[in-house]
Amino acid sequence: MITIKTNHGDIQVTLFEDKAPITCENFRQYIEDGFFDNTIFHRVIPNFMIQGGGFDPEMQQKSTRPPIKNEADNGESNRRGTLAMARTMDINSATAQFFINLRDNTFLDHGGRDFGYAVFGEVTDGMDVVDAIAGVETGNRGGHQDVPVEAVTILEVRSS
């Protein structure tokens, strides 16, 4: 069980270790390193997703380890409450940033429009916290859109 402690409350997550072993190992290493502590959910789009894991409260992007292989072909779907890896147009570019789906976003699945976005876990408790984060006011900041006006901080992420 993973706990994502935020300034809006706690989010409990279960990882799909058997379906996305590379992604889960990568995520766990970032947790062990304390990488996510005091980062923010920097992209919040209601009725779509909330994204975090890469920026500090000043909107400075953190340095990451090298990208990992995309495991979007693992049979899991980007449905409400699942966690998936964010990436660029490069299929195998995911590092630390992840998002939580606010609704079923099957168009992000493998084979939908491209290789897809790797689902590697799901929220088991705390979707009310995720939904509360989805409702915060957003604006433009640091060259980015959909950034919460008041920081939504990931205080720490712990594995139990």
Image (spheres, rainbow, N blue to C red):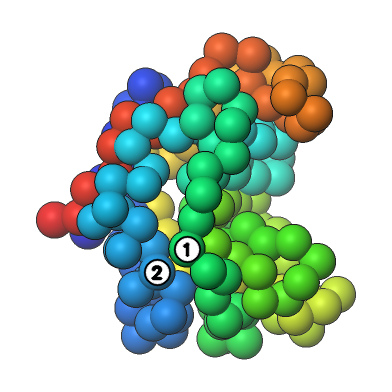
Q: Is residue 153 above or below residue 52?
A: above
Q: Secondary structure at mark 1?
A: loop
Query: Residue visible at 80% across and 28% down?
Result: 143
Query: Residue visible at 43% across and 41% down?
Result: 127
Q: Is residue 119 visible?
A: no
Q: Which residue is mark 2?
A: 26
Local crowd at mark 1 within 10 Å, few (<14), some, or many (≥20)?
Answer: few
> Residue 39: where, in percent of width, then height?
44, 34
Q: Which mark is residue 65?
A: 1
Kind of residue at badge 1: Arg
Nearer the camera: disc 1 or disc 2: 1
Q: Which mark is residue 155?
A: none
Q: Are marks 1 and 2 in contact (CB under 8 Å)?
A: yes
Where on the picture, by quarter, is residue 75? bottom right
Residue sticking out furthest to the right: 113
Question: Which quarter of the rendered picture does the N terminus lie within?
Answer: bottom left
> Residue 70: where, in percent of width, then height?
60, 79
Along the horizontal axis of the image, is 50 left or right of 115? left
> Residue 48: where, in percent of width, then height?
70, 45
